[in-house]
Image (cartoon, grey):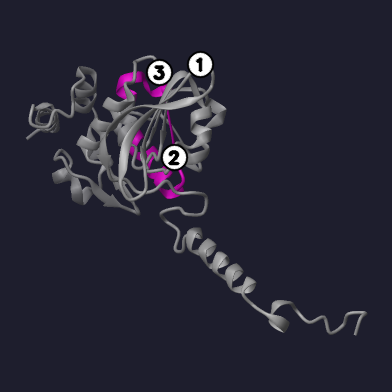
Amino acid sequence: MEPSALRDDMVASLEHEMKGLVRSEYIGLALRTVPRHEFVPLEAHEGAYTDQSFDHRGTKILSPSTVAQLLEALDVRETDSVLVVGAGVGYTSAVLAEIVGEENVHAVDITRTIVYEARQNLASAGYDGVFVDCRDGADGLPEYAPFDRIVVEAASIRPPHALVEQLTPDGRLVVPLGGGTQRLAAVERTRDGTSEVADEFGTVAFSPLLVDGEQADTVERNRTDREDREFAERHFQTRRGWEHEWIDWDGDGL
């Protein structure tokens, strides 16, 4: 079966009343247009147009239903400037490019090898105008701010302050919030500069938003290093007597 027919079937199943995940015509059209097989590994091509996710190089290629859920929550308009935090393999960015145009889509990812792959995938699929850079997602992309819409493909305990600051007045940030139990939330920036959770869209399960040094392709993440340092500090503070300080054998007082 031709990829276009497979995409039609995929989106039709997402629009079906039993799922109802695609409710907006423009999102359905974009999902029907983007060749998802360009964004999955070769060995996963047979399942490219099924509603499943794939683990890939320490990241997750989101299922079409999850992408649809994010985009429905984002409520994007065709003239919006959009930032994707957690670019992954580039599929969500490509779908957004179909809606708002390539020049209006910016994406960041903390893992350099994933950034290179996202660029290659987007170019192969015909969306090489999308800007993808290697950044700490929590810092956003201030050089290109403000953004009308920001979508985060990773979970955070609270909305990252820098991302809220990079929204336009009346801008919208969609982010999974929470630790063990996550909920997909839409955070809106008001005209006085404050923000508020405007809506919630059910429970989700995303990997946590990584910070600098926790790239998916590192052998040992800095989170482990940090925990080691904190443990050493706690151990140091529990010492008593002569263990607590170095002995200065060459000091003037001896």
Q: Earlier in the sequence, mark 1 or mark 3?
A: 3
Q: Is residue 165 magenta?
A: no
What x and y, as percent, mark residue 165?
Answer: 53, 28
Question: Which circle's residue, 1 or 2, is located before the other in the chain?
Answer: 2
Q: Can you identify the residue that label 2 sits on? A: 158
Q: Are marks 1 and 3 in contact (CB under 8 Å)?
A: no
Q: What amino acid is at disc 3?
A: Asp
Q: Regarding mark 1 in the picture, which secondary structure is present there? A: loop
Name the one closer to the observer, 219 or 221: 221
Separation of disc 1 and disc 2 at Cα? 20 Å
- Rounded to the nearest angstrom, the CA distance separating label 2 from label 3 is 24 Å
Which region is colored magenta? 97-123
| Disc 1 target residue | 191
Judge whether residue 19 can be spotted in this image.
yes
- Find disc 3 in the rendering and name its residue: 80
The residue located at (49%, 29%) in the rendering is 164
Q: Residues within 10 Å of mark 1 (few under 14, many from 20)?
A: few
The image quarter containing residue 15 is top left
Main SS category, magenta section:
helix
